[in-house]
Image: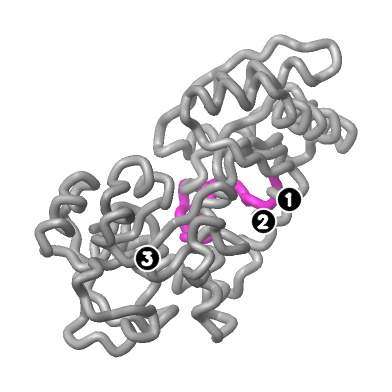
């Protein structure tokens, strides 16, 4: 993703400058984010592509995070989950037809989770009666739900359609909720959004933050303090790259998601992420730390 984006970005910046890629993979991307925030030149010549999960480190109170996520100049992302949906589904053999019925499940259903906080947040944000089962890898979870060891899973709609389409076509699973979207996915018009299933403002805010790693995608940013005119040039360059038919064709050929989000919208999303109340931030922190320790 980085190489492809960099190649097309250069085409849409005046003078078509050479783009040099430098990898800083250490500490889950923390080294790269700290570098861009604290060390990189603030003249528009250095930008970063960040690990989206690591951007949450300040919210989680991690001491290694020497940056404020909202102070970066956000430039855009080539993928924002707009063409996908994160789904929660159960085996159709179970009697439950809705998330409301799962609030009364007795005994609680057994649910697997590959990664992320969304599934782990469902009991406290939606009141779902479930027991989170850990220890499975992704492929093992597929087998576990087919064997009846698990009752439910979370996963992307695209993966379901591409990897286990028979689960949908054969009626093996029942999708009860979708996440990571502002509107219902066209393929799931009768499946409610997670945000439609909560009423408490704090629960809604927790869900919004939990969905953010999906919708941030592959975020590019310039250091804080980059002059406004340089930010405009960079954002315009990314906009041009995202509108480049050759770029889109290359991503489609590689079967990569292409649902761009421009810098201004990405900046607004980041600002929303960091503006949650201390109470919600603490709830998210506990869930994220529990997920990391599983």
Q: Does 61 appear in magenta?
A: yes
- For disc 2, the marked residue is 269
Question: Horizontal placement of 263 versus 209: left or right?
Answer: right
Q: Quadrant of the C terminus?
A: bottom left
Residue holding disc 1 = 265
Position of 223 with respect to 166 (left or right) is: right
**Eye-nearest disc, 2 or 3:** 3
Please state the extent of the stretch shown in magenta in the rendering. Answer: 55-72
Q: Residue at x 70, y 31 (%)?
A: 242
Name the disc covering residue 138, or none.
none
Q: Secondary structure at mark 1?
A: helix
Confirm or deny contact between disc 2 and disc 3 (CB under 8 A).
no
Residue at 24% x, 47% y is 138
How has the structure been colored for display?
one colour
x then y, percent, for residue 251: 55, 26
Residue 175's disc number? 3
Which element type, helix, strand or loop, lies under badge 3?
A: strand
Mark 2 or mark 3: which comes first in sequence? Answer: 3
Q: Position of residue 223 (x, y in %)?
A: 70, 36
Would you say residue 271 is visible in this rendering?
A: yes
Q: Residue at x 37, y 84 (%)?
A: 127
Q: Secondary structure at mark 2?
A: helix
Q: Position of residue 206 (x, y in %)?
A: 51, 71
- Spatial distance from mark 1 to mark 3, Cα to Cα? 29 Å
């Amino acid at each position: 993703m980085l190489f492809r984006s960099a190649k097309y970005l250069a085409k849409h910046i005046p003078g078509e400058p050479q783009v040099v890629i430098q990898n800083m993979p250490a500490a889950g991307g923390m080294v790269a984010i700290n570098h861009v925030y604290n060390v990189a030149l603030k003249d528009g010549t250095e930008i970063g592509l960040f690990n989206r999960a690591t951007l949450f480190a300040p919210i989680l109170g991690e001491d290694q995070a020497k940056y404020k996520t909202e102070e970066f100049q956000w430039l855009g992302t080539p993928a924002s989950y707009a063409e996908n949906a994160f789904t929660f589904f159960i085996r159709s053999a179970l009697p439950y037809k809705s998330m409301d019925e799962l609030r009364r499940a007795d005994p609680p259903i057994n649910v697997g989770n590959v990664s992320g906080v969304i599934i782990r947040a469902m009991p406290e944000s939606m009141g779902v009666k479930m027991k989170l089962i850990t220890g499975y890898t992704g492929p093992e979870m597929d087998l576990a739900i087919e064997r009846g060891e698990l009752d439910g899973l979370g996963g992307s709609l695209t993966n379901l359609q591409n990897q286990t389409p028979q689960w949908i076509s054969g009626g093996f699973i029942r999708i009860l909720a979708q996440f990571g979207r502002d509107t219902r996915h066209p393929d799931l018009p009768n499946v409610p959004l997670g945000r439609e299933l909560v009423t408490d403002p704090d629960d809604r805010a927790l869900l919004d933050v939990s969905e953010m790693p999906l919708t941030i995608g592959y975020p590019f940013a310039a250091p804080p303090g980059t002059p406004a005119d340089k930010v405009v040039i960079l954002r315009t360059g990314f906009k041009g790259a995202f509108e480049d038919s050759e770029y889109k064709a290359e991503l489609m050929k590689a079967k990569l998601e292409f649902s761009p989000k421009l810098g201004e919208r990405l900046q607004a999303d980041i600002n929303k992420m960091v503006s949650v109340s201390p109470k919600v931030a603490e709830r998210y922190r506990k869930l994220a730390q529990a997920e990391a320790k599983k």
